[in-house]
Image (cartoon, rainbow, N blue to C red):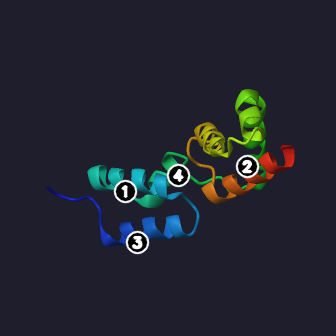
Amino acid sequence: MILNLNPQELAELIASIKGGTISGKIGKEILFELIAKGGTVKGLIEEKNLVQIVDPAEIEKMVDKVLTENPKQLEQFRAGKTKIQGFFAGQVMKISKGKANPGLLNKILQQKLNATS
């Protein structure tokens, strides 16, 4: 089996994850594609529009949308079922196609949930 991945591309992939350009999850997807088909990290990120969303205002809009569309779950959270926070985070990730920065997403989500409870 021939691997289509060279050390420079692997280094570029790691740098893209560490630098916040892409998430670890997206990094895994790119890694598998690089191994299978080859190509460049930069090329795949651009081709598939995989740049991570790090704009707080954009993530906040997605969080607001998810909270508005799920009043039943929001009520459960307010009633003390705090584990449901993961549901909200998952819904935002679904909307963003996995591109929302997880750390920023959780910070904004926590602020919103605590402000409304």
Mark 3 → mark 1, Cα distance in angstroms: 11 Å
Q: Relative to the observer, which residue lies in front, 82 or 37?
A: 82
Q: Could you say where residue 31 lies in the image, as x and y percent from the top left?
A: 37, 56
Q: Does residue 87 appear left or right of residue 2 in this picture?
A: right
Query: Mark 2 — residue?
Result: 109
Dot 3 falls on a residue whose secondary structure is helix
Query: Mark 1 — residue?
Result: 31
* Disc number placed over residue 11 in the picture, else none: 3
Question: Could you tell me the amino acid type at mark 1?
Answer: Leu
Mark 3 → mark 4, Cα distance in angstroms: 17 Å
Question: Could you tell me the amino acid type at mark 4?
Answer: Glu
- Which residue is depicted at the point 41% across and 55% down? 28
Who comes first in sequence, dot 1 or dot 2? Answer: 1
Dot 2 falls on a residue whose secondary structure is helix
Who comes first in sequence, dot 3 or dot 4? Answer: 3
Mark 4 → mark 1, Cα distance in angstroms: 15 Å
Dot 1 falls on a residue whose secondary structure is helix
Taking the image as drawn, is residue 69 in sight? no
